[in-house]
Image: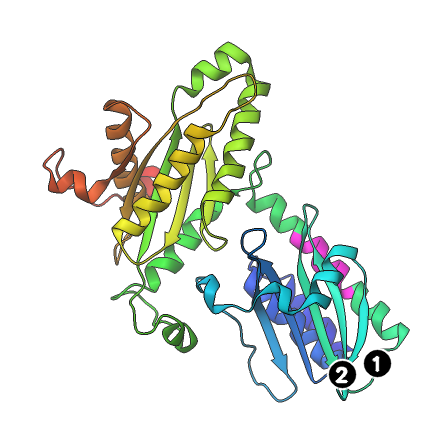
């Protein structure tokens, strides 16, 4: 039991969800000595959900395995192929069943906002009631700490990531670029078939948002922000990182193959926003600027480039998506010098 307590202390020591998931499965392996313990998250659009393995430990594994957060959805197993997991999430209760010569026990994993996935424990014999209660108690600690992370890392209104979480995610992306400080994980290498990673940063600004607040009041303005955040979730992929930086300014950090792919993603959001009927307000448009993340980039430097592209879009009619690299190539402005992170953030 002391080892389990050590794992729980480790789980709450770092403000890192990856570490939390790994230490959780490690704790359950030490406690129950199962054949395997794993965390699966249900991701993707409705009707096309997939299972993303967040952490899995088998009896003889030295380290946990996991799917890359940037894995393409097509490479992940369909949610419908594991109906028991879906049932566990839907009913938010513990499920136990026999599968062949072993037993599966599933526990729902949730936050205050939603059920994210399941903890799946595979054992030779069914878990006893006291063992199930112990696991449930550990998961309550996990749930509570996830709630604390959400409170500190997410925007209260929209539920998107907030500004102070941006730097760490950005620097992780930079470290994976050619010339970065880390090499790609071997499993990620296989998954992307030798392709080098390419990250893109976009800044999204609501056009004439001050007129919304002045004309309809801040409650309606907040509703516009909330609805736009939902449009963003529907327009981007599950692994794209979505932020609200404050006011009407949003940021997206994504991984895709080319400038054209990134532009299509931002155009999809621009189109979806322009076609949506916002209650009382009617049509709202957005201006978007984006740039490729470079090796050695600072968060402030990449943000400055994307932000300049946004201002170009707003100064040339709004409701547009502009690429910083294309604007430089067209001679509309010169390459911006590197910006130190302290200058902007």
Residue 254 at what x, y percent from top left?
39, 52
Q: Is residue 142 magenta?
A: yes
> 30 or 285: nearer the eye?
285
Q: As drawn, is 66 to the left or to the right of 195?
A: right
Residue 217 at what x, y percent from top left?
55, 14
* Viewer can see residue 345: no
Residue 291 at what x, y percent from top left?
27, 45
Secondary structure beneath dot 2 equals strand
Toward which corner of the image does residue 173 lie, by quadrant?
Answer: bottom left
Residue occupying the point 53% across, 26% down:
224
Toward which corner of the image does residue 285 lie, by quadrant?
Answer: top left
Quadrant housing the C terminus: top left
Q: Is residue 161 magenta?
A: no
Which residue lies under the disc numbered 2?
A: 123
* Residue contact at pointers 2 and 1, CB within 8 angstroms: yes
Q: As drawn, is 13 to the left or to the right of 241?
A: right
Task: Point out the stretch of residues depicted in magenta.
Answer: 138-146
Q: Which mark is residue 236?
A: none
Residue 170 at what x, y percent from top left?
38, 53
Q: Is the magenta stretch mostly helix, strand or loop?
A: helix
Q: Is residue 264 above or below residue 188?
A: above
Which residue lies under the disc numbered 1?
A: 126
Toward which corner of the image does residue 175 lie, by quadrant?
Answer: bottom left
Disc 1 crowd rating (10 Å Cα; few below 14, some 14-19, many 20+) is: some
């Amino acid at each position: 039991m002391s080892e389990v307590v050590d794992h729980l202390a480790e789980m709450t020591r770092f403000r890192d969800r990856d570490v939390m998931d790994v230490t959780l499965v490690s704790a359950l392996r030490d406690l129950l000595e199962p054949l395997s313990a794993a965390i699966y998250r249900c991701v993707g659009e409705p009707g096309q959900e997939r299972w993303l393995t967040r952490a899995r430990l088998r009896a003889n594994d030295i380290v946990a395995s996991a799917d890359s957060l940037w894995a393409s959805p097509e490479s992940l197993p369909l949610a419908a192929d594991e109906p028991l997991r879906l049932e566990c999430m839907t009913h938010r209760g513990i499920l136990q069943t026999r599968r062949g010569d072993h037993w599966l026990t599933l526990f729902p994993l949730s936050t205050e906002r939603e059920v994210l996935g399941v903890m799946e424990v595979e054992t030779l014999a069914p878990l006893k009631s006291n063992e199930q209660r112990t696991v449930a108690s550990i998961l309550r600690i996990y749930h509570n700490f996830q709630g604390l992370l959400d409170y500190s890392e997410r925007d209260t209104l929209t539920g998107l990531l907030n500004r102070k979480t941006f730097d760490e995610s950005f620097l992780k992306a930079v470290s994976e670029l050619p010339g970065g400080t880390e090499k790609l994980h071997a499993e990620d290498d296989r998954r992307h078939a030798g392709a080098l990673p390419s990250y893109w940063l976009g800044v999204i600004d609501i056009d004439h948002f001050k007129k919304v607040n002045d004309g309809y009041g801040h409650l309606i303005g907040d509703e516009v922000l909330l609805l736009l955040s939902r449009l963003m979730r529907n327009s981007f992929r599950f692994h794209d990182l979505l932020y609200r930086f404050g006011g009407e300014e949003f940021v997206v950090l994504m991984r895709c193959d080319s400038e054209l792919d990134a532009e299509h993603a931002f155009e999809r959001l621009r189109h979806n926003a322009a076609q949506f009927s916002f209650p009382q307000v009617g049509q709202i448009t957005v201006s978007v600027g984006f740039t490729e993340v470079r090796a050695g980039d600072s968060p402030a430097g990449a943000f400055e480039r994307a932000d300049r592209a946004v201002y170009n879009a707003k100064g040339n009619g709004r409701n547009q998506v502009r690429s910083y690299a294309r604007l430089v190539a067209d001679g509309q402005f010169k390459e911006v010098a590197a910006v130190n992170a302290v200058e902007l953030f």
